Image: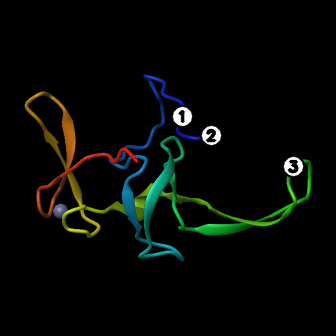
Amino acid sequence: MIGMSRSKKARGRVRTYLKKNDRVQVMAGKDKGKVGKILAIDLKKGRAVVEDANIVKRHTRPGPGTQGGIVEKPASIHISNLQLICPKCTDPVRIGFKLLEDGKKVRVCRKCGEIIEPASK
Ligand SMILES: [Zn+2]
């Protein structure tokens, strides 16, 4: 499972504002323009798996508990090819950061200024 390790001093992590469950648009590749939810994110590799995007077909052999055949599943996409969608603009937007009074750092849409909260689901 990727994205589960939470070491405090993670090295080689990619800096990104993207989080799991964010709605993003694919900006490059065969699924350019596709919108989906981030299902998993790997900050070490700088890649994310986006729902219904970059679907690859995997041939699997029949084995214990599996019938085998062709399985379609989303493959990861480099996060530089993903852009967060502002819930207010409903467009892929550039993201800035804002420090709230309580010291919390939030993501804001550079276009409309809306705070973009990480989705809980
Ligand atoms: Zn916006």
Left or right, 107 with reference to 84:
left
Labelled disc at residue 31: none
The answer to whether the beta carbon of the residue marked 2 is less than 8 Å from any atom of ligand 1 is no
Q: Residue at x 25, y 64 (%)?
A: 93
Q: Tell me how far mark 3 sits from mark 2, CA to CA.
A: 20 Å
The residue that disc 2 covers is 1
Q: At numbered mark 3, what does the secondary structure look like: helix, strand or loop?
A: loop
Q: Residue at x 50, y 52 (%)?
A: 39
Please state which amino acid type lies under the numbered disc 2.
Answer: Met
Q: Residues within 10 Å of mark 1 (few under 14, many from 20)?
A: few
**Residue 21 percent coordinates (x, y):** 41, 50
Q: Quarter-wise, where is residue 99 in the image?
A: top left
Instruction: Name the quarter where the N terminus is drawn.
Output: top right
Left or right, 103 with reference to 33:
left
The residue that disc 3 covers is 65
Counting residues from the start of the chain, the first of labels 1 and 3 encountered is 1
The residue that disc 1 covers is 4
Q: At numbered mark 2, what does the secondary structure look like: helix, strand or loop?
A: loop
